[in-house]
Amino acid sequence: MSTNKITTQKVNFKVFRFNADEDYLPYYEDYSMDVTSEEVVLDILNRIKWDYDGSFSYRRSCRHGICGACAIKVNGRSTLACKESMSTMIEYFGNDLTIEPLSTKRAIKDMIIDKADFWEKHAAVTPYLAADIDECPTCENLVSPHDAEELNEADLCIQCGACHYACPAVEINSDFFGPAAFVAAYRFEADIRDSDAERLINVNEEKQGVWDCVKCFECAEVCPKDINPIEKITKLHQMAFKKGVAKNNVATRHAVGFLHSIKKHGVLDEGGLVLYSEGPSIVKHIPVALQMFRKGKIIMPWNMPKSDNLDEIQKLIKSSSTVKF
Amino acid sequence: MKKLKYALFTGCTAKQSTPEQMMSTLAVARKLNIELIELTEASCCGASHLQDYDDFLSLVLNARNIAYAEKHGLTMVTICNTCQLNTAMTKHRLDKNPELKAKVNEKLAEVGLEYKGTSNIIHFLYAIIDDFGLDKIKKMVVKPLSQFNIAPFYGCHNIRPSELHDESHKQKENPYNPTSLDDLIIACGGMNVEYEEKNKCCGFHVELQAPHTAAVLTGNAIAGATDNNADMMVTPCPLCHLKLDTQTKHASEAIGREVSLPVLHMQQMVGLALGCTPAELGLKHHVTEVNFI
């Protein structure tokens, strides 16, 4: 039993309303209620439906943070309604809260959205075990605790979509698989029983794959299961190099280019990195580079700064490198 | 108050594409009587890309940088959000995993160094706010920026992951509604602009591999600030600054609307309020002209 005293405070809700069958545009309805510190966001959705408007629509099922149905946005933050306490929301955003579906442009009715893009991308990463397993085994296929740990909790994902619809790259680039699909891909790539040779190649393709991740950490911040999707994205990058499926393109050269620069100068050679990554395509950067040059923002190669004790850095690169490209 | 003293990890851009950031950092430190010992031995932090290729190497190199700060017995101060992320993340991972720490130290021993975990790592923004103090800044302002609406642009890697932020800094920051930079704007006499993109991504890290995504994010940020009557933007991150300052043409094309605002480094804003000259703060090094001085 919690010993915290239950407190009550007035909260003003601005709630997104829309019925795709009837409304030309969405609108917002205001509700004001006394909210107790024990309530979760789902309690508020229920109270709107039960006490104010029976037509208010939202998805919910388990109420225990496991079915992933009730993810919505509060003040722009993706959240799992049944798990998120109102006191946290008030602490984050104060007493004026805006309740919206995960993606307003995908709204069907109120909080209910069309998650088709989410599921298409999920399916596109073959999110299941591909293994040649004896149909009549004589013993169990055991996975050691150490190997199971490699999944890094990726199998805890409940496909709620909180990270997917918080990801800015998903909003801009409709081909991009997004953090949830990458977590699913990682889940099986990290499984020692899996033998799918295509998945890792697939999630490393340009436009759709991990290289278009903008590294904003929004996914890590919102995940209600603390799965840390960007950590899995990083691991998929690393796996591509380790398993030799990383293609030679601008994205992979951009990562490897750092090593070359550090080896030579200790610090990054900005111009050198762009040249190494882009190759002949560097010409497209010339107009901006000229502007920068005029403002004293470009260092000539002969003036490149170097780290002191560069020999230490070079020695460490030699002894600590674990990958070859 | 005892004189504040830190080990300064400049990062790479301060010595190359954002010289004005280095100049203004030193100018502000002089004004505030903060001593900065530059870690001239430091390497690049890998800018959140090296670890995609070789995670262990990235850890070793970052641990080496921290080891130099530890040798001075000083807290490390970063002036780039991504340096802050990579360095603080290294510290976080090594401090909670003794086995990994031992492996890294085995390598560092080859060059006579050791990562102990004794130096904290903070961004200069929080050194000013937490350690120096906003009230003291307020009292030192000689040229308040009172006629300006200033849009704070926080940059991802200073506020997310929030656990890492809160582990490194005294002041907790709400990743959905950060306030430190807003508070600093107000302390400098300016009006802080509220807008949706203030805690969003600028797109810097995918500029080469996903130029359209990067340009839209930059465009949205400047447009959001403009639509809320900002006269200028301010950021603690030189990478965000590079995007917002130098990429306005691509950003405008990507969002189908002309956008451009002067963008100050956080240090330049403080410097202006404290009476530093535009020359001291390197204002001539901006691509989008700072035309209000």
Image (spheres, helix red, strand yellow):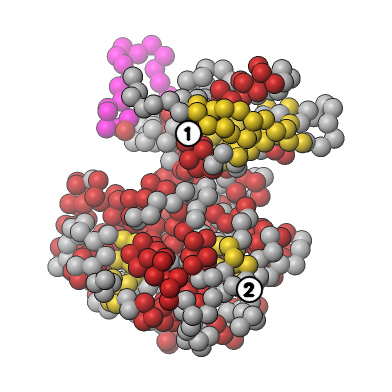
Residue B82 position by quadrant: bottom left
Q: Is residue A220 above or below residue A257?
A: above
Whether residue B153 is visible? yes
Closest to the observer: B211 or A20? A20
User: Which numbered circle lies on residue A87?
Assistant: 1
Closest to the observer: A324 or B119? B119
Whether discs 2 and 1 lie on one chain: the answer is: no
Q: Given the image, what chain letter belongs to the residue carrying mark 1?
A: A
Residue flagged by tag 1: what amino acid is it? Ser
Q: Residue at x 29, y 77 (%)?
A: B35
Q: Residue at x 63, y 67 (%)?
A: B149
Mark 1 element type: helix
Query: Disc 2 vs disc 1: Cβ atoms closer than 8 Å?
Result: no
SS majority, magenta: loop
Instruction: Name the mark nearer the viewer: 2 or 1.
Output: 2
Q: Residue at x 36, y 61 (%)?
A: B130
> x, y percentage for residue B166?
37, 50
Q: Residue at x 62, y 52 (%)?
A: B196
Left or right of A109? Residue A233 is: left
Residue A132 position by quadrant: top left
> x, y percentage for residue A71?
57, 30
Quadrant containing the N terminus of chain A is: top left
The residue that disc 2 covers is B147
Left or right of A276? Residue B290 is: right
The 10 Å Cα crowd at callout 1, few under 14, some 14 to 19, many 20 or more, is many
Whether residue A262 is visible? no
* Whole-number angstrom distance, CA of label 2 to CA of label 1: 38 Å
Q: Which residues are magenta?
A: A132-148
